[in-house]
Image (cartoon, coloured by chain):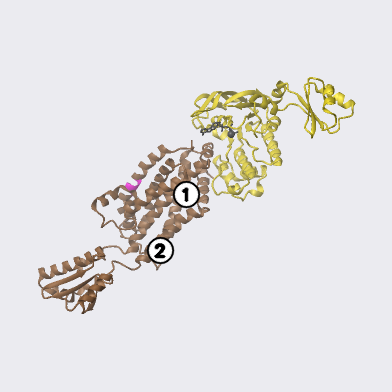
Chain colours: A yellow, B brown
Amino acid sequence: MGQTIIVQDLQKRYGDVHAVDGVSFSVEQGEFFGILGPNGAGKTTTLEIIEGLREADSGTVEVLGMSPWPRNSRLLPKIGVQLQASSFFERLTAREQIRTFASLYGIPAKKADDMLSVVGMEDKAGTRSEQLSGGQAQRLSIACALVHEPEVLFLDEPSASLDPQARRNLWDLLRAINDAGRTVVLTTHHLDEAESLCDRVAIMDHGKILELGPPAALVRGLDSATHISLAAGTLTVPAAQELAGPDASVVDDGVSLTFATHAPAPLLTALAERNLLTGISVRGATLEDVFLQLTGREYRA
Amino acid sequence: MTPFRSLSRAMLLGFVRDKSSLFFTILFPLMFLVLFGAIFTNQGVSKSKIIQIGQVAILDQAPGVGEILEITKQNDLAAAQEEVRKGDYEAVVRQQGDRYELYYSAADQVRSATVRGVFGQLVGQANAAGVPQRFTLAAEQVEDESLKIIQYVTPGLLSWAISMGATFGAAMTLVTWRQKKILRRLRLAPVNTTTVVSARVGASVAIALVQTAIFLGVASLPLFGLQLSDYWWMCIPLVIAGTLVFMAIGMLVGGLAKTSEAAAGMANLIVLPMAFLSGTFFPLDTAPQWLQTLSNIFPMKHLNQGMQDVMVRGQGPASILPELGIILGFGVVIAVIAVSLFRWDDV
Ligand SMILES: Nc1ncnc2c1ncn2[C@@H]1O[C@H](COP(=O)(O)OP(=O)(O)OP(=O)(O)O)[C@@H](O)[C@H]1O
Ligand SMILES: [Mg+2]
């Protein structure tokens, strides 16, 4: 297995803004790679440099052993890109759009139509792109990126503005594409998405990669508390505190009584002995907690 | 479908589904044709209306004079002068022995100058020849030489319509495709720029030929009465060459402008004055010499000239070659500049 993407020490400035500041990482063939980060972190800029849409101020990028800059027409058929802002020909229907894109890669119209049904857009095939809803436009844009079956797929916030159903469908689709051996790189604001799809994620802020690794490893490395919630008033706060021990914190916000503890097992046993497990919810640390700790900010999805 | 065909198709569909660009490219020039046609229908140079008081030898003895002057006979000089003052007539003429008296109004300088010119000539000829019957007004009759107004206006309006269509088509495609990120998307697809540009050229040429067909069709209706000469079809290479040169101008505009409003403004700023200065709407024959010389730097002037030569002046196919060469030369120069200004992206 080779390295599909190798990025070394990328730098990109826009005037005073240091949009990308020394980013290095590599993506293996067949890997599902995610880039997370708050708005303005530099995700899109990084992605666009790798795709060959922007020139880095310094640093090197190699995709499938080739340099994407300047425009490299041997590389282009092998990559598929869904841009953050969807870009369609004016006044063409969904079907005409994808057929036009397909033709640019020498793909027959029939396959383009099939791709439209893969993303569940066949009943919107005759609608002009201007009249599609946000989520429908997003799906069309993803279909256009996939139509030539690229080896490497770049998706910039693919699930933005999708409804939960469409988001699940997209996940299934992306998993299938990845299982077929294609490399996928995506940016997302949804940590659950990154957790469920990505083999590895890079967390970015202020143009730098703060942490990189498999989501589970990042969460484990965080050593954060497990949250256990019960219905409010199940126990009084002092009683709960006594049960949980001095290292845990207990909060009753009137809706739920929540313990945060690093030793969940004894607490759960104690609750079980008192027959208080009804309606219990146990939440371990998630990528969200990792993110919060790294960037010091709430995830603005 | 090949990338070339699918891109041209995408552009043409985008064009025909946009009502306002359809209007401005096809109907707007036709409106001008109707307008000019209505103003000037069957009207060459209109006759000057003058009043004759009593006997006026040079008028009574000159047989051809009725073709340029519409003469009304009256007796009261003062009343006639009043009518001239009101603008109903151009002049009053009276003979007092050997003296011809001409009263005209300064309100319409052009008309009165014409009338004065005509009389100057009449008197001059009468003096020179001394034989009244030998008077001839043939020298004054430029009408056979000049073109009937529809004959003049059609090639001009057509060149203008083609120029507008090509300039706006290229400029707008470039700007809106850049704004809507379609150019970036195309940049990510394995098509070369030549294909994208030739697709636009293909679409623009197709639009221009349709414009030409509709325009000539309408102008040839009995209502307008355009008479095409034998080699009118030689206007097709001219239309294509004109499309190319004005597309290059449009690409230039599209390269400079950031928004479609700016592009529309710039395109108008270039095409409209050029149309006037190239004699598209009105002949330049009466314009000062420097202006006539200046007009040669505009490709539209040459487009016009070539169109008139083959469409209405009845010149042979070879006559357009110099104009065609000049237009294409312009096209190459402008295209080189346009390519250097080309940007895929806003930023
Ligand atoms: N074309 C540009 N000109 C100037 N500054 C830019 C440009 N594009 C991006 N920036 C700046 O670079 C920084 C990184 O932007 P980028 O689009 O990469 O962020 P992002 O991580 O994709 O954010 P989001 O989650 O909102 O999509 C931002 O501060 C942004 O303002
Ligand atoms: Mg972004």
**Magenta stretch, residue numbers:** B324-328
User: Which of B174 and A184 lies nearest the eye of the viewer?
Assistant: B174
Residue B230: percent from the left, percent from the top?
34, 61
Please report contact status of discs 1 and 2: CB closer than 8 Å, yes or no. Answer: no
Mark 2, chain letter?
A: B
User: Which of A46 and B323 lies nearest the eye of the viewer?
Assistant: A46
Answer left or right for B112 relative to B231: left
Question: Ligand 1 is in which quadrant of the figure?
Answer: top right
Mark number displayed over residue B203: 1
Mark 1, chain letter?
A: B
Residue A174 image-quadrant placement: top right
Residue B157 image-quadrant placement: bottom left
Label 1 and label 2 in one chain: yes
Of the residues under marks 1 and 2, which one precedes in the sequence?
2
Residue B151 image-quadrant placement: bottom left
**Residue of label 2:** B34
